[in-house]
Amino acid sequence: MVRIFRQYIPIPFLILGLVEFLLLVSSIYLGMVLWGFLGNTEITQTGIPLWPKALVFAAIVLLAQMSMGLYQRRFRFGLAGMILRIGISLAVTAVALTLLYYIVPDLFLDRGVLAFGFLIAALLLVFTRFLFVRSMNRDQLKRRVLVLGAGENAAQISRQLRRRVDQQGFVIVGHVHVRGEHDVVDESLVIRPDVTLLTLTKELNVDEVVVAVGERRRKSFPVHDLLDCKLSGIDVIDLLCFFERETGKLKLDILSPSWMIFSDGFNQSKSLNAQKRIFDIIVSLLLLGIAWPFMLLVAMAIKIEGKGRGSVFYRQIRVGQHWQLFNVYKFRSMREDAEKGGKAQWAKQNDDRVTRVGRVIRKTRLDELPQIFNVLKGNMSFVGPRPERPEFVTQLSEQIPYFAERHRVKPGITGWAQICYPYGASEKDSLEKLQFDLYYIKNYSLFLDLVIILQTAHSVIAGKGGR
């Protein structure tokens, strides 16, 4: 993997993106050649040469594919699903280009050239993806990982990453037994070497050693062997960093305050906060400009269902940055008497308190659009941890370690946890989502915010996360 803007990006996906970008640019040039070959010599031209138009076309297609989840590390759809998503991304591109040509006419491409360009792009993308999926399933192309340790910590790798789709980027070649540690992993995977660790890595053609020893202060911990590996070009990484890279979350059961203090990340500088605030305002205004007709329709639907009675908007106290309380705004999706007696309740699957209109707007996330005003007011950010109610925050802070740390940043309309984990409505769900929230707080960047926004579009289209 390579790290760009503090985000781990698998090299195969980086190469895939670059290859597809070049193919998309080439498809426009091929489209022009084919259109001319059919005798269409009079091609509409503008003052801008062809190459900027081809670059714009390629960039929009890549963004549309990202919003369809086609660059997710753990995509769980087959070839048919992939072809469908490519088709949708090209349709989204067509709509985006229509708007763009209206705003910037100089970028206009002749309709015949564009039609051939879309057709060639579709064929090239499907063929490239087919080859990519085939190559990703070959162990020869994966990173070879040797785990130091065979105890309880080491066993978490196979438990947490047990599915093949979770191990697309690496293959475990074995677990090295460490004296004094009780082995838990499958005995067939345990290695008891009679050579040095460096010699073993060379014999097994290892690319990386993951240190998963539970107790590192014992005398049997091979400090010098690990140093030999490191200085000989073998990557050495601890278990927590390994999980962070492969799962996009911080494992709470092996997380320690010292690791958080000395690791890179958790940057809350004034300049970074100022950049995020500007980003929030720009994105919120753009979304408001696009979403206001839908917001008006939702308000009318709520009023019609309620026969003119009841409020359209719903206000609720939530905990924000630095534990400050604020009112979050949402479209009302439940009955007015959803919480009799004022007692806070978790939302349930198929909750009978949800209205008919509420089921639709919660599934499509339209109920959360009024939170744009929270972002503009400064109570929330566009991207961040989900804002929770004070009652739940008090309860969960007592039961889950590090839960209070999620309030070091502003809560968000969408977030890393929301796109990586289903709707959370229990203590267990909150613990799982906290691990993703901590990853976001540690690795925050505007690039990550953009990725989350695009992935949120995919979640909304796929109907994920609503309840």
Image (cartoon, grey):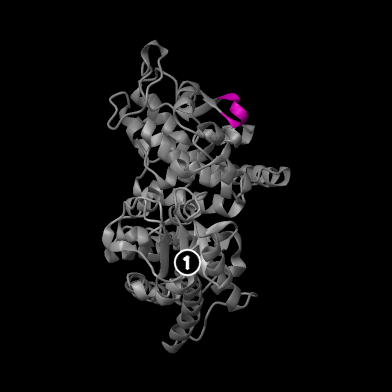
- Can residue 199 be seen? yes
> Residue 220 or 292: which is nearer the viewer?
220
The local crowd at label 1, few if under 14, some if 14 to 19, many if 20 or more residues have their Cα within 10 Å, is many
* Outermost right residue: 271
Q: Amino acid at mark 1?
A: Glu
Image side of residue 282 versus residue 223, left or right: right
Q: Residue at x 38, y 68 (%)?
A: 193
Q: Residue at x 60, y 58 (%)?
A: 5
Q: Position of residue 215 (x, y in %)?
A: 47, 48
- Can residue 95 be seen? no
> Residue 406 or 70: which is nearer the viewer?
406
The residue that disc 1 covers is 208
- Helix, strand or loop status at disc 1: strand
On screen, residue 151 above or below 303: below
Q: Position of residue 159 (x, y in %)?
A: 32, 51
Q: Position of residue 81 (x, y in %)?
A: 30, 61
Q: Position of residue 98 (x, y in %)?
A: 50, 61
On screen, residue 466 above or below 334: below
Q: Which residues are magenta?
A: 320-326
| The C terminus sits in image quarter | top left
On screen, residue 115 above or below 418: below
419 inside magenta stretch: no
- Image quadrant assignment for residue 177: bottom left
* Outermost top residue: 341
